[in-house]
Amino acid sequence: MSRKLMLIVSTLLISIFAFSAAFAMGGGNARKGKFLYRKNCRSCHGTSASDLSPSSKTQAQWTATFADTGKIQCSGDWTISEQDLNDIFTYLHDYASDSPSPAKCS
């Protein structure tokens, strides 16, 4: 096999792997996350706590925020499952200020 062909095949395989890994990491349901955010988070983040919506941060900032949820100030008050938390993260991340479709309102 020529070097050029091997380079093309290698690049293709790496691209497929990266795409599938990125898809598998998300896995949350943004629609359900929006419902859960409104039900569990909006009561504070919109009235008494800092006004917070998906477009308050970039996708990278949401990823950094949820990288260690124990560091989130209000996390001690949460009574939601890990899957629900993943859905909320997916909603916030997918509609962040730098996403293809940023949220217009919370």
Image (cartoon, rainbow, N blue to C red):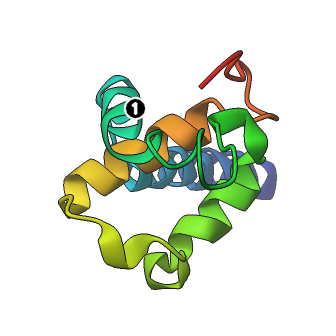
Number of numbered callouts drawn? 1
Residue sitting at x 40%, y 44%: 88
Q: Position of residue 48 (x, y in %)?
A: 59, 50
Vertical comparison of 33 with 11: above or below? above
Specify whether 19 is left or right of 100: left
Residue sitting at x 34%, y 43%: 87
Q: Secondary structure at mark 1?
A: helix
Locate the C terminus and report the quarter of the image it occupies: top right
Q: Position of residue 36 (x, y in %)?
A: 31, 37
Specify whether 96 is left or right of 36: right
Say which residue label 1 marks: 38
Q: Residues within 10 Å of mark 1 (few under 14, many from 20)?
A: some
Answer whether residue 23 is visible to the viewer in this image.
Answer: no
Answer whether residue 28 is visible to the viewer in this image.
Answer: yes
Vertical comparison of 100 with 11: above or below? above
Q: Nearer the viewer, residue 9 or 26?
A: 26
User: In the figure, residue 37 lies in which quadrant?
Assistant: top left
Q: Nearer the viewer, residue 7 or 46?
A: 46
Residue sitting at x 74%, y 22%: 100
Q: Nearer the viewer, residue 40 or 59?
A: 40
Q: Nearer the viewer, residue 84 or 7?
A: 84
User: In the figure, residue 33 lies in which quadrant?
Assistant: top left
Specify whether 87 is left or right of 90: left
Amino acid type of the residue that numbered disc 1 sits on in the rendered structure: Arg
